Image (cartoon, grey):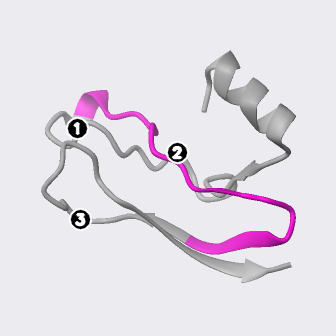
């Protein structure tokens, strides 16, 4: 979320990151707690908003899953 290419993408696409308001929620890598970063995202347009967002338990990947409950605005 801190890279300029990602910020440019959000700006140009008019999409919003559902993570806003829910904290950093790092999702990768699973096996290095101190080095985890929020690399996985759920993006929505202006018609949707996240009412709940969380990182899931281990799903058998090197990434944790990202779970969102979405609502119409």
Instruction: Give the residue displayed 40% in from the left and 44% down from the top.
Output: 26
Q: Earlier in the sequence, mark 2 or mark 1?
A: 2
Instruction: Give the residue displayed 62% in from the left and 20% down from the top.
Output: 3
How far apart, in angstroms, are the residues tagged by discs 2 and 1? 13 Å
Front-most of 21 and 3? Answer: 3
Q: Which mark is in front, 3 or 2?
A: 3
If the image is split into quadrants, where does the N terminus sit? top right
Front-most of 55 and 73? Answer: 73
Specify the segment rendered in magenta: 34-52
Q: Earlier in the sequence, mark 3 or mark 1?
A: 1
For the image shown, how many numbered marks are present on the structure? 3
Residue 8 in picture, x, y percent from top left: 77, 25
If the image is split into quadrants, where does the C terminus sit? bottom right
Q: Quadrant of residue 66?
A: bottom left
Query: Any magenta on residue 61?
Result: no
Q: Are marks 3 and 2 in contact (CB under 8 Å)?
A: no
Instruction: Give the vertical position of 57 relative to 28 (above or below).
Output: below
Front-most of 9 and 27? Answer: 9
Q: Which residue is mark 1?
A: 33
Q: Quadrant of residue 50?
A: bottom right
Q: Earlier in the sequence, mark 3 or mark 2?
A: 2
Instruction: Give the residue displayed 52% in from the left and 45% down from the top.
Output: 24
Q: Which residue is mark 2?
A: 24
Q: Which residue is mark 3?
A: 57
Is the residue marked by circle 3 packed among few (<14), some (14-19), or many (20+) residues within 10 Å? Answer: few
């Amino acid at each position: 979320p801190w890279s300029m290419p990602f910020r440019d993408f959000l700006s140009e696409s008019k999409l919003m990151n559902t993570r806003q308001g829910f904290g950093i929620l790092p999702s990768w890598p699973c096996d290095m707690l101190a080095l985890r970063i929020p690399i996985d995202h759920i993006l929505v347009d202006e018609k949707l908003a996240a009412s709940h967002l969380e990182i899931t338990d281990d799903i058998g990947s090197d990434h944790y899953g990202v779970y969102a409950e979405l609502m119409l605005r």
